[in-house]
Image: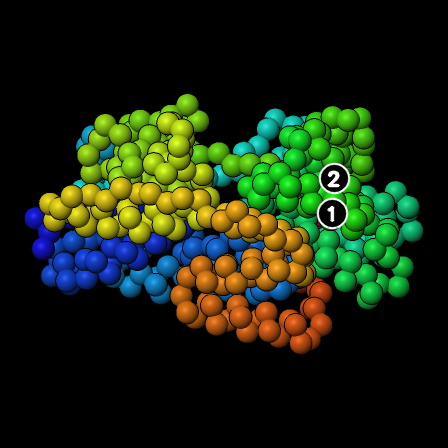
Amino acid sequence: MVKERARILVVGGGYVGMYTALRLQRRLKQELGRGEAEITVVTPDPYMTYQPFLPEAAAGSISPRHVVVPLRRVLPRCRVLIGEATAIDHAKRTATLTTLASEEEGTGSEQLSYDELVLAPGSIARTLPIPGLADHGIGFKTVEEAIGLRNHVIEQMDIASSTRDPGIRDAALTFVFVGGGYAGVEALGELEDMARYATRYYHNVRPEDMKWILVEASDRILPEVGEDMGRYTVTELRRRNIDVRLHTRLESCADRVAVLSDGARFPTRTVVWTAGVKPHPILAATDLPLNERGRLKCTPELTIEGTTHAWAAGDAAAVPDVTAGEPGKECAPNAQHALRQAKVLGDNIVHALRGEPLETYAHKYAGSVASLGFHEGVAQVYGRKLKGYPAWFMHRVYHLSRVPTFNRKARVLAEWTLSGLFKREVVSLGSLEHPRAEFELAAGGKPPLKPEDDPKGSS
């Protein structure tokens, strides 16, 4: 039994936010029923996105609705608020929130009081002041971006198939990906695989007509899977006629021309930015201690240093790695740690409420797996290196075991089985992004002034 009534505020509905709330509602089931505890989850979206499946969703191997987990369905004992925390005053135990109703009501932001705070807002894309990036770049962190990118790639193939202008055709069939981490390599591998398959349905577009370019500023890609597997990945991608450029940076993409630091220039209508992430801006709007990288300073018990009743984990937290031999090393901000940290975090909050000793988070990194497209992958698990089909199969098995809820597991497995029995569905639904465009035009709305303003297109 908890010592006193506890109002727990969870900021963020991603890996850590959802799994922590899930753990808390299980461990505090009786207290929640008696009204001795209350859990509030504040999140911009009503679902948790399983990001490792975004590349396959973009390629059409998995339906977008099976990549997300509805929070209200898995957290029935929690109060889910769709909105964002804009500031936190932990000294006063209050959070400033804006919700979907705030603008409608015209009352502005609201104050929410709490007793225990869990900060798990995740991260956002780390961008640079590159000319044209804000106008033409495409991110790859959300399911909306993944499906939008799929629509965009197929739409570019439609443009190339129908135009008579060789310049427009060349730009439409040139795809530049910036960033050689998991997101960039997996997105490039899956989409190139999908586009190559789609060319069989175009009478005048062949796989060799397309240019796929991967730009990475460091000397290797996929550092998580080791140097040898990184070199193998470069070799495999180049075998598929993908132009991998190491020690290279994107300097400009203004006027739809990608200018690289090695002097190369590529007219292109597709620049995908996956060059890292940075902590969520909410962290800077708190009175909690941050490290030099802008992440919350945490203890091995997942409390925030120098404070009480404040907890953090995941991308937003700098958690000491107690299993590492060198002092000062922190846990990598990835899903493998986030899932395990959330369990310890939920348990420690319960321990704190009941006056019990806290647990220490300790997990030795098991390894990494990455998909390079259908039946291709690389993996390094517990020191063992795999490549090709075995690595791809391990990638699918591992992530199937980690996707939340049995319902999602069954649906994803069914889709994989059906995709192996039938042909791919290759279609662009760009109008999904602006579903009222057709009706607005029919009802007397003004047509777009410029082709790039066309609300029906994804480009």
Q: Looking at the image, can residue 271 be seen?
A: no
In the depicted structure, whether residue 176 falls above or below residue 38: above
Q: Residue at x 59, y 28 (%)?
A: 128
- Residue 254 place in picture, x, y as percent: 73, 31
Q: Which of 376/134 is in front? A: 376
- Amino acid type, mark 2: Val
- 348 left or right of 449? left
Q: What element carries label 2?
A: strand
- Which numbered dot is residue 71? none
In the depicted structure, whether residue 175 falls above or below residue 371: above
Q: Crowding at label 1, few (<14), some or many (≥20) Cα neighbours within 10 Å?
A: many
Residue 305 appears in which quarter of the rendering? top left
- Which numbered dot is residue 237? 1
- Amino acid type, mark 1: Leu
Its colouring scheme is rainbow
Q: Which residue lies furthest to the front in this view?
A: 384
Precedes in sequence: disc 1 or disc 2 = 1
Q: Crowding at label 2, few (<14), some or many (≥20) Cα neighbours within 10 Å?
A: many
- 200 left or right of 357? right
In the depicted structure, whether residue 298 falls above or below residue 448: above
- Which numbered dot is residue 244? 2
Q: Which residue is drawn at 70% across and 64% down?
A: 427
Q: Which of 103/273 is in front? A: 273
In the depicted structure, whether residue 39 falls above or below residue 298: below
Q: Which of 72/260 is in front? A: 260
- Residue 375 place in picture, x, y as percent: 67, 61
Q: Do tag 1 and tag 2 residues touch (Cβ < 8 Å)?
A: yes
Q: Residue at x 69, y 45 (%)?
A: 232
Q: What element carries label 1?
A: helix
- Residue 323 place in picture, x, y as percent: 37, 38
